């Protein structure tokens, strides 16, 4: 390994994109991945008895995104628009068009008047403290937890404002053969360019001096290179010292470590429930609620697992449940069986089923409790009041030798996405080249 130019720790979208770009530029790269698969938070379940291309992690391409689109094109991968109706279920009723919550305009106006950033909760407490604002505050917190998977105690009010302003309704897509086909393309190209990817190689220690890095895995394997890119999730940087994936760095880099602790990392549990039929499309069910739900893509509710979606435009009996933010942290200690039960109970309540009867209709299920998942410990990054300052430091390599990559390193409109991870990987590689 003596001639290795760059060691890359983590074979998610960011690490692989960096390896792909560097190896194409003639650099000798070695990627070390803790798990027995590449992809990280991209994990497509293939060829299982019921699920086909079911996504445990990333699922949508959120619009026409430059780096993702260009890569899809290079890889010759096809994708399709994922669209359908949005429904809200509350107090026993389905409603399609949710009127804007009362007070929303005032909230946006107040956000614009803010001169200094503060956390979303602090903002709501200061400017919307009355009982009359309760519904508005709940709705804002629900959005922050559901969409950003964030803790409103830490989420930046400025970030929320910017997100609402840049909200775009452009189409979302699903990759026809699953998100992992993008990962497979990158891995194949890296190997074609003589790059190496080692699985089951959890990095434990990194010792370094300018221009030289020594890495040891938990199995005691040693690697050496001129530079290293840490492309591990923010959740690992923020996890307790004994957590799987933690890396000790000698000499220490305390200011970078402190900067990493100040960023926000969300929590998520995703649940896949495959039923014996798409009963929500069933005429009787539609008739019972007085509405037609056959074209439902997203269903939002106040249930314990509140957000659900279908596989539209493909007809499928798979329902995907989504619980983000502090509520996901609370449930993350449950067993998968308990989480599945909560998910079925949520659906049973919405569609007026007996829970046990609905369980009999369940063919298979899968709980992706990413918040409890070793080597990840959460969903994706969100901005805190310290993010800009922290990223400024983290984006500068340490003595031209230690580099950081990952979705959390991205600043722009696609925060927390695969696009963010790919862009970060590309950027760090270009910085090196
Ligand atoms: C449930 C869920 C749904 C999502 N949905 C979407 C979506 O629809 N669209 C979208 O664009 N984005 C989505 N995202 C976000 C997207 O998946 C991530 O932003 C992106 O995949 C992160 O890539 P990454 O390379 O930064 O990190 P990761 O993919 O997490 O890769 C980091 C890698 O580092 C490895 N690692 C950790 N510690 C060590 C160690 N010590 N040694 C070696 N390796 C180590 C990990 O095993 C992992 O493989 C979703 C995320 C989740 C969790």
Image: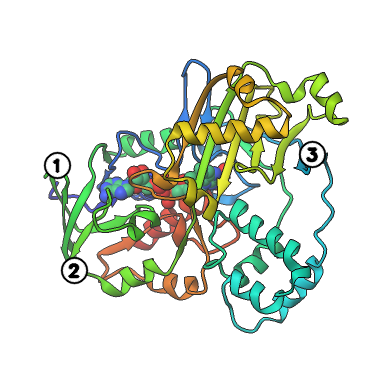
Find disc 2 in the rendering and name its residue: 210
Give residue 77's position: percent from left, percent from top: 55, 32
Give residue 266's position: percent from left, percent from top: 49, 55
Which element is circle 2 on?
loop
Nearer the observer: mark 2 or 1; the answer is 1
Is the residue at mark 3 in contact range of ligand 1, meaning its CB lies under 8 Å from it?
no
Quarter of the image with the C terminus is bottom left
Residue at image x 17%, y 69%? Answer: 251
> Image quadrant of residue 89?
top right
Vertical comparison of 76 with 416: above or below: above
- Mark closest to the chain's N terminus, 3 or 1: 3
Q: Residue furthest bottom?
A: 115
Residue at image x 39%, y 45%? Answer: 372
Nearer the observer: mark 3 or 1; the answer is 3
Residue 395 seen in this snapshot: no
- Mark closest to the chain's N terminus, 2 or 3: 3
Residue 277 seen in this snapshot: yes
Give residue 49's position: percent from left, percent from top: 48, 15
Marks 2 & 3, CB-CB < 8 Å contact: no
- Mark closest to the chain's N terminus, 2 or 1: 2
Which element is circle 3 on?
loop
Find disc 3 in the rendering and name its residue: 92
Give residue 321's position: percent from left, percent from top: 59, 37
Q: Which mark is residue 219?
A: 1
> In the image, 372: left or right of 163?
left
Vertical comparison of 407 with 298: above or below: below
């Amino acid at each position: 390994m003596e001639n290795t130019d760059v060691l890359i720790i983590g074979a998610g979208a960011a690490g692989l994109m960096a390896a792909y770009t560097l190896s194409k530029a003639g650099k000798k790269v070695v990627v070390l991945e803790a798990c027995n698969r590449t992809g990280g938070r991209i994990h497509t379940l293939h060829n299982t008895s019921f699920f086909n291309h079911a996504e445990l992690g990333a699922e949508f391409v959120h619009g026409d995104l430059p780096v993702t689109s260009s890569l899809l094109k290079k890889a010759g991968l096809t994708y399709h628009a994922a669209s359908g109706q949005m429904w809200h279920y509350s107090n026993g009723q389905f409603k399609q068009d949710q009127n804007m919550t009362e007070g929303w305009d005032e909230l946006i106006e107040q956000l614009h008047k803010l001169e200094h950033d503060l956390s979303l909760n602090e903002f709501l407490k200061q400017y919307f403290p009355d009982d009359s604002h309760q519904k508005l505050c709940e709705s804002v917190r629900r959005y922050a937890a559901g969409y950003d998977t964030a803790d409103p105690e830490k989420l930046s009010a400025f970030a929320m404002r910017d997100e609402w302003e840049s909200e775009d309704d452009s189409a979302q897509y699903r990759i026809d053969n699953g998100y992992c086909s993008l990962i497979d393309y990158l891995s194949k190209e890296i190997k074609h360019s003589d790059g190496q990817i080692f699985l089951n190689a959890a990095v434990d220690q990194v010792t370094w001096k300018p221009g030289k890095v020594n890495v040891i895995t938990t199995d005691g394997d040693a690697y050496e290179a001129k530079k290293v890119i840490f492309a591990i999730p923010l959740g690992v940087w923020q996890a307790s010292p004994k957590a799987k994936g933690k890396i000790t760095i000698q000499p220490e880099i305390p200011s970078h470590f402190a900067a990493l602790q100040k960023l926000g990392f969300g929590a998520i549990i995703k649940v896949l429930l495959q039923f014996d039929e798409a009963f929500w499309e069933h005429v009787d069910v539609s008739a019972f609620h007085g509405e037609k739900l056959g074209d439902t893509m997203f269903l939002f509710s106040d249930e314990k697992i509140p957000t659900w979606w279908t596989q539209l435009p493909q007809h499928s009996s798979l329902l995907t449940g989504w619980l983000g933010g502090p509520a996901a942290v609370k449930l993350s200690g449950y067993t998968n069986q308990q989480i599945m039960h909560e998910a079925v109970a949520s659906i049973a309540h919405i569609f007026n089923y007996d829970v046990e009867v609905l369980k009999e209709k369940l063919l298979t299920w899968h709980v992706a409790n990413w918040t409890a998942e070793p080597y990840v410990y959460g969903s994706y990054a969100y901005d805190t009041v310290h993010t800009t300052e922290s990223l400024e430091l983290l984006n500068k390599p340490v003595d031209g030798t230690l580099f950081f990559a990952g979705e959390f390193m991205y600043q722009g409109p696609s925060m927390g996405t695969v696009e963010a991870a790919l862009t970060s990987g590309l950027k760090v590689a270009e910085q090196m080249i």
